[in-house]
Image (tube, helix red, strand yellow):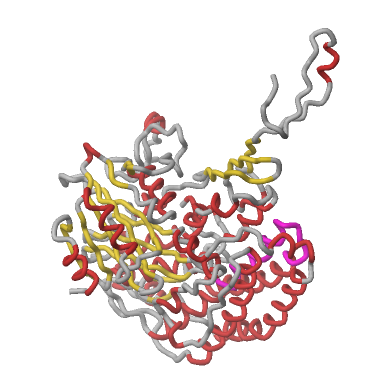
Amino acid sequence: MHPLLQRIQQTFSVGVTGLAEWRGDVAVTVSRDKLHEVAQFLRNDPGMDFDYIVHVSSVDWPDDEERFEVVWEFYSIRKRHRIRLKTRVPESDCVVDSLTDLWKGADFMEREVFDMMGIRFRNHPDLRRILMPDDYTEGYPLRKDFPLRGKGWRDTFDFLDEVPR
Amino acid sequence: MAFEDQRTTVYKIDPEHPESESLPTLRTEELLLNLGPQHPSTHGVLKVILELEGERLVKSTPVMGYLHRGVEKLAEDGTYHQFIPHTDRLDYVCAMYNNFAYCRAVEKLLNLQVPERAEYLRTIVAEVQRIIGHQFWLGAQALDIGAMTVFFYCFRDREILLDWFDELCGARLTTTWYRIGGVERDLTPSLIDKLKQFLDYFPPKIDEYQVFLEKNRIWLGRTKGIAVISAEDAVNFGLSGPVLRGSGVDYDLRKYEPYSAYPKCEFSVPVGKNGDTYDRYWIRVMELYESVKIIRQCLEQMQEGPIMADVPSVTLPPKERVFTNLESMIQQFKLFSQGFDAPPGEIYCGTEAHKGELGFYIVSTGGGKPYRLKIRAPSFVHMGAFDHMARGYMISDACTIFGTYDVVMGECDR
């Protein structure tokens, strides 16, 4: 097992629900209530020292009980290692702790996740839509149930029948 | 109505003498100013709401999304091969590097080894693209601040390389030259000659660019000590590329996680000290020299060999065979329309593009299409630090800060 994963497993007996290593990428899945605690450990522990935020992302798994997966990726510039932190959120209670207090760069990235997937971040300083317009009411575009051609007023468009050759 | 503020002088209006209304009322208040959405210095369509106190920026709120085209959603609907042309349209100034970053990510997902010659070709073209990107940046940034001459010189030399791209792949900007597992076609002897000529021609020109700017007092005044960010903050915000290196952090993925032919080349990573706009300029100019060095070494070391990995279930057959051989044509058609069967899993792969770390996070559940594809665009991350870096500077410095990020909105909004 990767030494990072070993260390995390030793430190957190409960709350860590999955450890994975694939193609050299290290990923930790934690339960939602432990997220901030684990993130703080990753940020502040001298052996971890993840000072650089790479991206915040989200994946929609419509068939699962806990539908959404929020993904943070960190890098340590001094230690030169990388980790992925994941947590699952159910659709009925789409809230997860914000990590903006640890990494300021998470601000815009989490806003994008909110905009695209509709996941709310607790304690986020300015949780508004970022890429879609502020008054956009047609839902969250990257969810799997959002059709590719769009929703709302575009549904009223007439589509031309295929021209017979 | 009188104001308590000491700086405020209010002339009270005497109801007996209404003409006193025309007396000047001197009072200060915060002014809200919209910069953009259409402003030449925003390099695309970006609005920033500036809160001003006099000419000082108190708070700035970027409003983005004017160029949002839903590229990540489109990716979920197409096969891996079909997405390559979409990556051209992310950072349309440097299409090659986007192709490169995307192909590397898919290769990591597939665990695909790329032949050596293809790695060298990729590195050469990526560095040519870096030169183009930095030339574009240098010209445009100087133009934003008002130094016009260097713009013409940069674009003159950029044109040579764009014509070179045209000969290489038939397009100047939206190139789509990289393929999963290799590259689309090899360099011809004529292309190699032209590139060598350019490498001899170019270094004196970089000196020329520098003379234009570094002897220009106005330009120096507008870049030195402007938009300073400390190393700690820059790392915390997730900045990358020259913007981070300007603050003294030598984070460069070409060195930290070497890929392609970079480990076989000798080059140095310039690092700044003060974290201001001038240092970030200096780094980019030094990188031009380094790119020339890398290309020279690659051209010397490169050996003959295949330019595409030979994994028929994934990689495309050579173009000549597609036109003459039925099986190859069917193979090409199936790879583009149905795709290959990617293993289930998830990867993140970051590449050092000239703007910073361009990464792709791909979640695959098997099959020919990515389940989820997230683009980590450096421009987007840099815009997150805009407010922090602009606070306290003059309103005219806002344009300098757009410039210093090298922001391209196509990539920022995706």
Identify the residue at horizontal 70%, vertical 69% (top origin): B154
The quadrant in which residue B338 appears is bottom left
Left or right: A63, with A86 as reference point = left
Depicted B73 relative to depicted B404: above or below: above
Decide whether residue B149 is among the magenta residues: yes
**Residue B347 placement (x, y as % from top left):** 29, 65
Q: How many marks?
A: 0
Left or right: A153, with A40 as reference point = right
**Residue A65 placement (x, y as % from top left):** 15, 44
Identify the residue at horizontal 83%, vertical 20% (top origin): B22
- The span shown in magenta is B130-151
Depicted B105 relative to depicted B1: above or below: below
The answer to whether residue B326 of the structure is visible from this angle is no
Left or right: B16, with B256 as reference point = right
Identify the residue at horizontal 77%, vertical 70% (top origin): B212
Foreground residue among B157 and B34: B34
Residue closest to the far top:
B16
The quadrant in which residue B333 appears is bottom left
**Residue B29 placement (x, y as % from top left):** 67, 33
- Magenta-colored segment: predominant secondary structure: helix
**Residue A48 placement (x, y as % from top left):** 30, 68
Depicted B180 relative to depicted B192: above or below: above
Q: Quadrant of the N terminus of chain B?
A: top right
The quadrant in which residue A79 appears is bottom left
Decide whether residue B333 is among the magenta residues: no
The answer to whether residue B57 of the structure is visible from this angle is yes
